[in-house]
Image (cartoon, coloured by chain):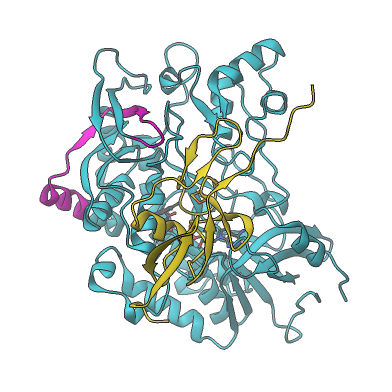
């Protein structure tokens, strides 16, 4: 397949990866600044995680479906602006599966077609600029029984409700950490589940220190906070109990989850003995935060911060020439941040003038949303240290707790491997135990493995951003003109 | 495609109905299923975990092709879905 070449000489070609809030915003800004733009998203629709919705025309969404959405008008305007712009080419079901650095710039390898199908159409792009807006996925700390069917991430419950109109269960408990648990509980209730409770691991003290400290700094961030306040009111209406300083420390059942154990936690998230109680459920949704999708950024050689986000400057430029990043790949700050960052990235990647009035507005918006992000991390962040060795949540792992879901490696086996090989180096323990070597490439367990071994892990490099079938690989690598 | 259209897929030969546009996972969960794969080593049941294509827990065989993520693939009328169990490679002593 011939690499796409730049349409008109002198006109920059910007490829945006991801059509969530950040990617759509970047695509519009880049096109309005005069670039030719290609937007690629693996999903069947635009909107990303925030505006995930059922397949099919927007007009056909029912009132019930629209009630699950926030800022839907913003999305429709943005989506229409991107689709109708003559300089924008939008490709959905387009999985970017690898990225390479070349002297003349980045190269992206893409497969277009139904997910995981054989015979998808390979495309290669060699643009002047890439905007990475690939978002994040849920981070869930392992606990005994978390591999049982019916235990899902909070994001999965949200996605299945918004795009498929189904509830993951009928008696559901939501647990973990972060403000995201609230919309998930509200959505589950809206699609007909009985939500038994929302259990937030952070205790009242951490929540107050994070959210109530110097409230004047939150001026200008009203959008997200109003949305959260709305959920709080909705919870009262739906009578969903919200409990802080508690976690699901085990799931029980034969072949599927039938009950969970909830325990109170100390400030390091260690379970407090004697506070356990068992609740019958048929589903439980657990998330402790988000992990950015970094594989393309790492493949393109961009610098990564110690908190493991893409490092960007005020114009959303990464350390790699030709590469910009926006949205949750650069920090977990919510949809308003993604929109502001996307605009800045797209505008700058297209070579737009830096001191425009709109650029100043976007910079101001981004600064306000980042204040929310700092507070979110302070209030809900996973503790890294506990009283003894490692964070308190390690104490809810038993020896037979599955840590690596793909290769079914338990916490006991990880510790034994470390002891036998006299190594806490995550790389060597992974090679011996097979933890993190399964098909998800360690995305679900890597951080937990590192915490269990008590050794900081090296940044994972995943040369293949998504598994591809050998036949497709052969075709994609075939003769190129 | 209209939103009111129905699709019917078969799962291990049994017809299961869903709404047009739903993912295979959505159709299965809508039909009350929570698990549709067994793991290679412990033969443990699995279904959806991440819901967005990252964990690979939800893979099924679709129209003769294994390892298709049910949470990503939209169901098409007539899709032949088979619950997946791939035995681990034999260990040579
Ligand atoms: C499952 C899930 C559900 C969420 N639901 C909500 C919610 O309801 N409310 C809320 O406030 N926040 C929610 N969030 C948080 C959410 O991440 C942000 O609110 C917001 O969507 C971030 O915008 P973004 O543009 O940075 O990324 P996203 O919205 O995540 O968009 C990233 C896009 O990139 C695409 N992509 C990623 N990698 C590739 C690749 N290699 N090739 C091609 N395309 C790729 C994805 O398909 C996706 O559409 C959710 C997060 C997750 C993981
Ligand atoms: S549920 Fe994780 S890939 Fe489908």
Residue at left 48%, top 64%? A20
Q: Out of B64 and A300, give the one closest to the viewer.
A: B64
Q: Out of A147 and A264, give the one closest to the viewer.
A: A147
* Residue A67 pos. (x, y %): 24, 66
Residue at left 35%, top 62%? A162
Residue at left 40%, top 43%? A152
Answer above or below: position of A84 versus A143: below
* Residue A259 pos. (x, y %): 29, 31
Q: Horizontal placement of A38 versus A287: left or right?
A: right
Q: Out of B1 and A91, give the one closest to the viewer.
A: B1
Could one spot residue A200 in this view of the protein? yes
* Picture mark count: 0
Answer above or below: position of A91 versus A239: below
Is A56 magenta? The answer is no
* Residue B51 pos. (x, y %): 45, 52
Report which quarter residue A431 is drawn in. Answer: top right
Could one spot residue A204 in this view of the protein? no
* Residue A347 pos. (x, y %): 56, 71
Q: Horizontal placement of A271 versus A395: left or right?
A: left
Answer above or below: position of A90 versus A214: below
Where the N terminus of chain A falls, by quadrant?
bottom right
Q: Colour of chain A?
A: cyan
Is A240 magenta? The answer is yes
Chain assigned yellow = B
Q: Out of A319 and A266, give the one closest to the viewer.
A: A266
Where the C terminus of chain A falls, by quadrant?
bottom right
Residue at left 39%, top 46%? B34
Instruction: Find the magenta span and give its range.
Output: A229-257
């Amino acid at each position: 397949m011939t690499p796409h070449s730049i349409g008109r000489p002198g006109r920059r070609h910007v490829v945006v990866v991801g059509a969530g809030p950040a990617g759509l915003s970047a695509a519009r800004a880049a096109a309005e600044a005069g670039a030719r733009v290609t937007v690629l998203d693996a999903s069947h629709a635009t909107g990303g995680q925030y505006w995930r919705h059922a397949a099919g025309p927007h007009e056909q969404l029912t009132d019930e479906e629209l009630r699950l959405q926030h800022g839907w008008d913003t999305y429709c305007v943005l989506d229409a602006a991107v689709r109708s712009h003559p300089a924008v080419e939008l490709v959905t079901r387009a999985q970017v599966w690898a990225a390479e650095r070349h002297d003349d710039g980045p190269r992206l390898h893409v497969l277009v077609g139904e997910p995981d199908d054989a015979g998808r159409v390979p495309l290669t792009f060699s643009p002047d600029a890439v905007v990475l807006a690939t978002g994040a996925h849920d981070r869930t700390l392992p606990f005994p029984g978390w591999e049982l069917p019916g235990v899902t991430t909070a994001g999965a419950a949200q996605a299945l409700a918004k795009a498929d109109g189904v509830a993951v269960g009928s008696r559901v408990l939501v647990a973990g950490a972060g403000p995201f648990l609230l919309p998930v509980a509200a959505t589950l209730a809206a699609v007909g589940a009985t939500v038994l409770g929302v259990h937030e691991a952070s205790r009242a003290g951490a929540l107050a220190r994070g959210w109530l400290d110097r409230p004047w700094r939150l001026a200008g961030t009203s959008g997200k906070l109003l949305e959260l306040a709305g959920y709080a009111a909705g919870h009262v209406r739906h009578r969903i109990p919200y409990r802080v300083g508690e976690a699901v420390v085990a799931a029980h059942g034969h072949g599927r989850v039938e009950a969970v154990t909830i325990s109170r936690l100390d400030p390091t998230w260690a379970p407090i003995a004697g506070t356990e109680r068992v609740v019958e459920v048929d589903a439980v949704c657990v998330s402790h935060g988000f992990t950015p999708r970094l594989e393309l950024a790492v493949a393109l050689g961009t610098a990564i911060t110690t908190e493991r986000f893409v490092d960007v400057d005020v114009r959303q430029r990464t350390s790699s020439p030709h590469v910009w990043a926006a949205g949750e790949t650069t920090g977990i700050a919510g949809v308003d941040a993604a929109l502001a960052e996307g605009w800045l990235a797209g505008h700058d990647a297209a070579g737009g003038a830096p001191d425009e009035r709109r650029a100043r507005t976007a910079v101001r918006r981004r600064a306000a949303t980042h204040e929310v992000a700092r507070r979110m991390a302070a209030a809900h962040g996973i503790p890294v240290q506990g009283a003894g060795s490692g964070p308190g949540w390690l104490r809810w792992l038993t020896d037979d707790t599955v840590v690596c879901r793909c290769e079914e490696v338990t916490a006991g086996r990880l510790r034994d491997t470390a002891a036998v090989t006299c190594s806490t180096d995550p790389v060597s323990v992974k090679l011996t135990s097979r933890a993190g070597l399964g098909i998800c490439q360690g995305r679900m367990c890597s951080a937990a493995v590192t915490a269990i071994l008590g050794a900081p892990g090296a940044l994972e490099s995943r040369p293949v951003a998504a598994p591809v079938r050998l036949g497709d690989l052969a075709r994609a690598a075939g003769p190129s003109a | 495609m209209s939103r009111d259209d129905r699709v019917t897929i078969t799962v291990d030969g049994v017809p299961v109905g869903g709404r047009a546009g739903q993912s295979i996972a959505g159709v299965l969960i809508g039909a009350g299923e929570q698990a549709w794969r067994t793991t290679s080593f412990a033969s443990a049941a699995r279904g959806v975990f991440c819901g967005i294509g990252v964990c690979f827990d939800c893979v099924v065989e679709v129209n003769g092709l294994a390892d298709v993520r049910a949470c990503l693939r939209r169901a098409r009328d007539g899709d032949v879905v088979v619950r997946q169990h791939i035995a681990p490679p034999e260990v040579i002593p």
